[in-house]
Amino acid sequence: MTAPQPRQGVLDISPYVPGKSSAPGISKVFKLSSNETPLGASPKAIEAYGLAGQHLQDYPDGAATALRIAIGKTYGLDPARIVCGAGSDDILNLLARAYLADGDEAIHTTHGFLVYPIVTLGAGAKNVVAAEKNFTADVDAILKAITPKTKIVFLANPNNPTGTYVPFDEVKRLHAALPKNVLLVIDAAYAEYVRRNDYESGIELVATSENVVMTRTFSKIYGLASLRLGWMYGPAAIVDAVNRIRDPFNVSGPAIAAGIAALADTAHLDKARAHNERWLAWLTEEIGKLGLTITPSAANFVLIHFASEKTAADANALLMSRGVILRQVTSYKLPNALRMTVGTEEANRLAVKTLAEFMGKSA
Ligand SMILES: *Cc1c(COP(=O)(O)O)cnc(C)c1O
């Protein structure tokens, strides 16, 4: 007898490596490695979380009804077509488990979010990688990668770690050319940050088709990453399938309470958006001036490309020694780049100053 063996694909998964949160020997650090908001959660969400803490003995509402109603009100959606999850990672995993079987294929792009291959391989399916153009998902390459075995296309829009996005016209062109049995998962984790007229988060496509799902998260602009809260909006049949396999209590009571309060605090949301708009532009310009290339970002982070003589690894070492923690993105097939989350003013200025020093320029 051999020892227990995991299903096909499980041992092919490269374990996810999260952004670092500490720098050796440095007590004051600026964590710009996980796309968390520098503004923190809404004070109202923190208060609601505290109140929910007085009822930890009670099971939460497994259907997260009040939260789905609040999301529906905020975005103009039917709450019956929303499923909440323990982060959108939970939702991505549920979609993979519901729609992929051994031998199926799921497509993502070269520098696509790393959770896609994890949930694909975990479901026994094969992940197929479609090439990007200028660090951006390429609709034609995705369509070329479709085979009779394709069951899911994962599209992060905007994508992490590149920050690039696919305009709505292109997403529609992708959807129109997809076989009807292929599920298009539009992961719009950074939708609230996008300020582009030709962008649409996915709501319109979901509303008008049977094979599109949009996923969203409270981890980024809402600042609730630690609570694990995300959701999807999808066609009734897909909502039904996902609800059958999700854990009955996959979202905690404090997460539901904080999520509802966060949605209601539109002033906090506006503040977070305005902060990002200002500092994303500033970082793009100031880092660009140092002779480093930045991929234009529509989200709350920038991807900084280094040169062969002044490498990302060396820059990272200097930044770490100053307590500035960025994300190395080697596992995203970007060995000579760093991803930097937009931080507080203090963090942003220190990062640029340190990068200037690294490049031998004064800032
Ligand atoms: C951060 C991120 C998420 C959010 O994950 P959660 O599980 O909701 O915290 C989803 N997709 C992308 C592309 C992300 O960068």
Image (spheres, grey):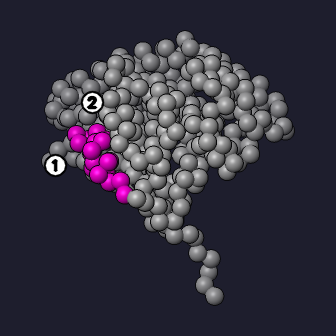
In magenta, the rendered stretch is: 130-147
Q: Position of residue 338 (x, y in %)?
A: 31, 41
Residue 351 appears in the rendering:
no
Q: Under 8 Å from ligand 1: the CB of mark 2?
A: no
Q: Residue at point 29% right, 20% down?
A: 282
Q: Residue at point 37% right, 20% down?
A: 195
Residue 308's disc is 1
Check contact, mark 1 vs mark 2: CB within 8 A: no
Tell me the crowding category of disc 2: few under 14, some 14 to 19, or many 20 or more residues within 10 angstroms, Cα based: some
Q: Residue at point 51% right, 70% down?
A: 8
Q: In which quarter of the image is the C terminus?
A: top left
Secondary structure of the residue carrying tag 1 is loop
Q: In which quarter of the image is the N terminus?
A: bottom right
State how far apart marks 1 and 2 are (Cα): 21 Å
Q: Residue at point 62% right, 33% down?
A: 82
- Which residue was labeled with disc 2? 296
Q: Position of residue 156 (x, y in %)?
A: 41, 39
Secondary structure of the residue carrying tag 2 is loop
* Amino acid found under the numbered disc labelled 1: Ser
**With 1 as the anchor, is 155 left or right in this view?**
left
In the depicted view, which residue is nearer to us: 28 or 95?
95
Q: Note whether 261 is above or below 89 in the view shown.
A: above
Q: Where is residue 141 in the image (x, y as percent from the top left)?
A: 27, 48
